[in-house]
């Protein structure tokens, strides 16, 4: 079974530039998450999709971050304009539909962003 | 707001030592608690603990959920250098599918 695919793996940009990250979840996983992980911290949820609808984007800085999952499969996360504090790993994850006993989420390898 | 706290934040041991990592949580309507191991890449799943499965074991790793104390421990016996990683604890409630992560414990195992 193929895992969660992300690209690019690494990106270095200057502040005020824009960047986009792509994620393709595990086949059949309806729920897709974007997490931001700053060095030394745990992952923080940015946005959660169920199919092509947004479930939770309460922690997404909407003045500069946007995300879409138009066809309910792959997703794009965009940052425009980037700030120095956006330097982090952007982790995409996916999970299958809710089961009675709960389920796990599966992570991609992350997109490492450095803003200089 | 759901919250997860882990301790210690950092730990250095020698090969062969036994370590215990702690996770405590505050969550409305608890559903499950998960442990992940993160090396220089994406977190990989270790265990999921729920009300119906409060103890899990795999090789040298084991974990217990204490629903009364709202906490969990992750034990690693006979540590090896390959156990060096960040160990993340996450909780999930029954309302959504969001997983709230703690800050992680950075474990360094020296030869």
Image (spheres, grey):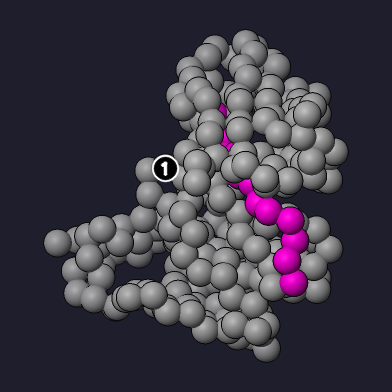
Closer-to-camera residue (A76/B80): A76
State the SS at label 1. loop
Q: Residue A93 magenta-drawn?
A: yes
Furthest-bottom residue in this view: B68
Other-residue count near label 1 (Cα within 10 Å), few / some / many at <14 / 14–19 / ≥20: some
Query: Looking at the image, is B43 positioned above or below residue A22?
Result: below
x and y percentages locating residue B9 in the rendered image: 46, 61
Rendered image quadrant of residue B65: bottom right
Query: Looking at the image, is A98 positioned above or below residue A112?
Result: below
The residue range painted magenta reads: A87-100
x and y percentages locating residue A54 in the rendered image: 83, 39
Query: Looking at the image, is A76 positioned above or below residue B110?
Result: above
User: Residue at 30% across / 61% down in the picture?
Assistant: B83
Q: Which chain is disc 1 placed on?
A: B
- Kindly tell me whether residue B27 is visible in this rendering: no
- Kindly tell me whether residue B53 is visible in this rendering: yes
Query: Looking at the image, is B12 positioned above or below residue A101?
Result: above
Q: Residue A20 magenta-drawn?
A: no
x and y percentages locating residue B18 in the rendered image: 29, 78
User: Residue at 77% across / 34% down in the picture?
Assistant: A72
Locate residue A51 relative to residue A23 in the image: left or right: right
User: Residue at 78% across / 29% down in the picture?
Assistant: A71
Identify residue for label 1: B41
Rendered image quadrant of residue A47: top right
x and y percentages locating residue B61 in the rendered image: 37, 74
User: Residue at 55% across / 40% down in the picture?
Assistant: A4
């Amino acid at each position: 079974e193929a895992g969660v695919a992300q690209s690019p793996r690494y990106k270095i940009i200057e502040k005020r530039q824009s960047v986009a990250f792509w994620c393709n979840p595990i086949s059949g996983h309806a729920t897709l998450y974007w997490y931001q992980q700053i060095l030394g911290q745990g992952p923080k949820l940015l946005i959660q999709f169920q199919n092509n609808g947004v479930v939770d984007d309460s922690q997404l800085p909407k003045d500069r971050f946007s995300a879409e999952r138009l066809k309910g499969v792959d997703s794009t996360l965009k940052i425009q304009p980037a700030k120095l504090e956006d330097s982090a790993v952007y982790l995409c994850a996916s999970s299958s539909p809710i089961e009675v006993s709960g389920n796990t989420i599966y992570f991609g390898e992350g997109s490492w962003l450095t803003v200089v | 707001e759901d919250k997860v706290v882990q301790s210690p934040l950092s730990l250095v041991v020698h090969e062969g030592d036994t370590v215990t990592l702690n996770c405590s949580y505050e969550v409305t309507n608890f559903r499950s608690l998960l442990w992940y191991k993160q090396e220089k890449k994406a977190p990989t799943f270790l265990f999921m603990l729920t009300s119906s499965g409060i103890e899990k074991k795999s090789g040298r790793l084991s974990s217990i959920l204490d629903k009364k104390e709202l906490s969990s421990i992750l034990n690693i016996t006979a540590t090896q250098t390959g156990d060096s990683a960040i160990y993340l604890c996450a909780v999930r409630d029954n309302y959504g599918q969001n997983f709230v992560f703690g800050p992680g414990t950075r474990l360094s195992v020296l030869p």
